[in-house]
Image: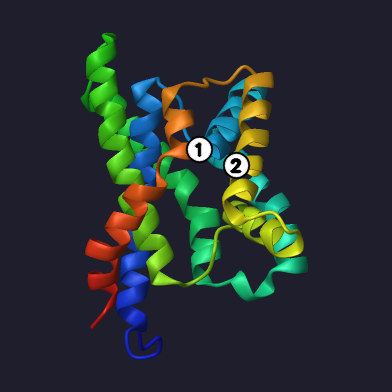
């Protein structure tokens, strides 16, 4: 991949991925079946203290960024800040739009279908964001740094950081459900599929 010649394409793919990431988070939220661990934690804290999700996410990213700037400067790029300052706002806008346009059914099967759509959208968004290779989000870098500093494989480091977020979300009264479990353990294969068959083709010239 020629990282110089296709920079505009990679930037476009990254921003498209972030827009979809906001939509994916919103779909998980309205499904009422639990968000991904870090989002569930941020939403739970925000609901508890009465602060909007986007504001709490900005603060959380600032705290996580301390670790990134101290131990992982090579992972910092335009994508780091685009994710930091953009995803929370995009998710809030998507949530507001969805709530105005649709009434989510209370029955389990329709909500399960909504969750499945959310899994696909979020997986696609992550594949686009990561394949663009323009910097890693402050939260996502934590498990990478932990795997670099310890003999623990990345997979288990990610499970650890996600588990901590899930525990904090639970302590703050957040919604922990099937969606949280799926995000913590099951997005990998979908992300890999979209990275190979969609994101890589969009990034390449």
Colour approach in the figure: rainbow
Toward which corner of the image does residue 92 lie, by quadrant?
A: top left
- Neighbours of disc 1 within 10 Å: few (<14), some (14-19), many (20+): many
Residue at 26 percent across and 9 percent down: it is 107
Q: Residue 187 placed where, x, y %?
A: 40, 44
Residue at 40 percent across and 86 percent down: it is 3
Q: Is residue 81 visible?
A: yes
Residue at 47 percent across and 72 percent down: it is 134
Q: Quarter of the image containing the N terminus?
A: bottom left
Q: Are marks 2 and 1 in contact (CB under 8 Å)?
A: yes
- Secondary structure of residue under mark 1: helix
Q: Residue 66 placed where, x, y %?
A: 75, 59
> Does 204 sit above or below residue 85?
below
Pick whichever, 55 or 6, lies toward us: 6
Pick whichever, 166 or 83, lies toward us: 166
Q: Which residue is mark 2?
A: 159
Pick whichever, 55 or 145, lies toward us: 145
CA gap between label 2 and label 1 equals: 7 Å
> Does 48 sit above or below residue 74?
above
Q: Which residue is mark 1?
A: 184
Residue at 61 percent across and 30 percent down: it is 166
> Does 144 sit above or below residue 120?
below
Pick whichever, 147 or 123, lies toward us: 147
Q: Quarter of the image containing the C terminus?
A: bottom left
Q: Is residue 19 visible?
A: no
Q: Is residue 51 left or right of residue 103?
A: right
């Amino acid at each position: 991949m020629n990282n110089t010649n296709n920079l505009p394409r990679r930037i476009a793919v990254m921003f498209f991925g972030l827009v979809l990431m906001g939509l994916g988070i919103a779909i998980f939220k309205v499904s009422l079946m639990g968000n991904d661990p870090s989002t569930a934690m941020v939403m739970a804290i925000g609901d508890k203290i009465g602060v909007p999700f986007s504001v709490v996410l900005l603060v959380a990213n600032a705290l996580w960024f301390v670790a990134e700037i101290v131990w992982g400067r090579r992972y910092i790029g335009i994508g780091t800040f685009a994710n930091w300052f953009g995803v929370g706002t995009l998710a809030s806008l998507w949530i507001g739009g969805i709530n105005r346009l649709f009434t989510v059914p209370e029955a389990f099967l329709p909500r399960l279908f909504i969750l499945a759509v959310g899994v696909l959208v979020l997986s696609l968004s992550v594949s686009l964001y990561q394949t663009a290779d323009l910097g890693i989000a402050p939260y996502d870098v934590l498990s990478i740094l932990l795997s670099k500093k310890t003999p623990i494989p990345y997979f288990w480091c990610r499970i650890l950081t996600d588990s901590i977020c899930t525990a904090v979300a639970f302590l703050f009264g957040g919604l922990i459900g099937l969606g949280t479990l799926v995000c913590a353990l099951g997005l990998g294969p979908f992300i890999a599929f979209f990275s190979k068959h969609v994101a890589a083709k969009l990034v390449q010239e």
